[in-house]
Amino acid sequence: MHNLNDIDPGMTIDWGKTSRDYAKYRPGPPPSFYIKMQECGIGLRDQSILDLGTGTGVLAREFAKNGANVTGLDISSEQVAMASSLAKDEKLEINFVASDANKLPFEDNSFEAITANQCFLYFDKEKVIPEIKRLLKNGGLFSTSHFCWLPLIDNTAKKTEELILKHNPNWTAHSYSGEIPKFPTWAQNEFELAGHFIYDEEVAFTWESWCGRIRACRGVGAALSPEDVKKFDDEHLELLKNLVPENFTVTHRIDAHIYRPRK
């Protein structure tokens, strides 16, 4: 996410611990996102795409459903195993690789597009940007994107974040303003801006699915012990029952930047 820290002091972040909840309760951006990405030239039929930080293959699987030739990469072997299983269940042909995004195991000029959704803040930009430029074919596109709830606007998100901080005071990915730069400073010397979109959407949840979504976040399931996750989850469910009806929505902001490498 823009302008948020990539590290929580004193905490070890292990996304592999969240794989089961991640697969079930983090479906990723809504269908409108993929339509806008195609309008910007990413996610097209027969396009060769590398999805960095693929997690459980959310973007990778959607691109594959639209006929793209997709490779998904994640540093967590547990996430890659879950992504492979989900793709197999959906009868999708995707090459999933467990590897560090800062040193990519592919030949030069391998992809027409490279994507990084909700993960670019975790990468070493000095290492990954040259790798991205090395791997893109002539005319290729690179995108960073985000799908974030808005705690300063949405009361359910606000109250949930307050509870996360009660159980994990070291969590720094809170209070997201939703402010999106037109052209991030880290990209300006390396890329040309080829496309950009921002919009808000109300995303439907139930008590169960919002609890699962929050368990699969960095401040809870990826950081806390199983015992502490259970304590948080019980309190979170009670909070929701007193706060919202069983079916409700949470306001999310969706954004993407699409870049072409500078020569």
Image (tube, rainbow, N blue to C red):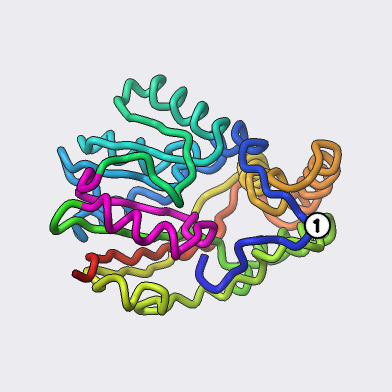
Which residue is at 66% across, 49% downward? 214
Q: Check if residue 113 falls in the magenta segment.
A: yes
- Please state the total of marks drawn on the protein image: 1
Q: Nearer the viewer, residue 138 or 235?
A: 138
SS under mark 1: loop
State which quadrant residue 131 falls in: bottom left
Which residue is at 60% across, 47% downward? 247
On screen, 148 above or below 212? below
Start-end of magenta stretch: 108-136
The amino acid pointed to by label 1 is Asn
Which residue is at 27% across, 34% downward? 65
Which residue is at 33% across, 37% downward? 71
Q: Check if residue 73 falls in the magenta segment.
A: no
Q: Position of residue 223 (x, y in %)?
A: 73, 48
Q: Position of residue 94 (x, y in %)?
A: 32, 29
Label 1 Cα neighbours within 10 Å, binned few <14 / some 14-19 / many ≥20: some
Q: Position of residue 35 (x, y in %)?
A: 26, 53
Residue behind mark 1: 168
Left or right: 234 as drawn, with respect to 105: right
State which quadrant residue 76 falls in: top right
Instruction: Quarter of the image for the C terminus: give it.
Output: bottom left
On screen, 2 above or below 181? above
Q: Nearer the viewer, residue 250 or 98?
A: 98
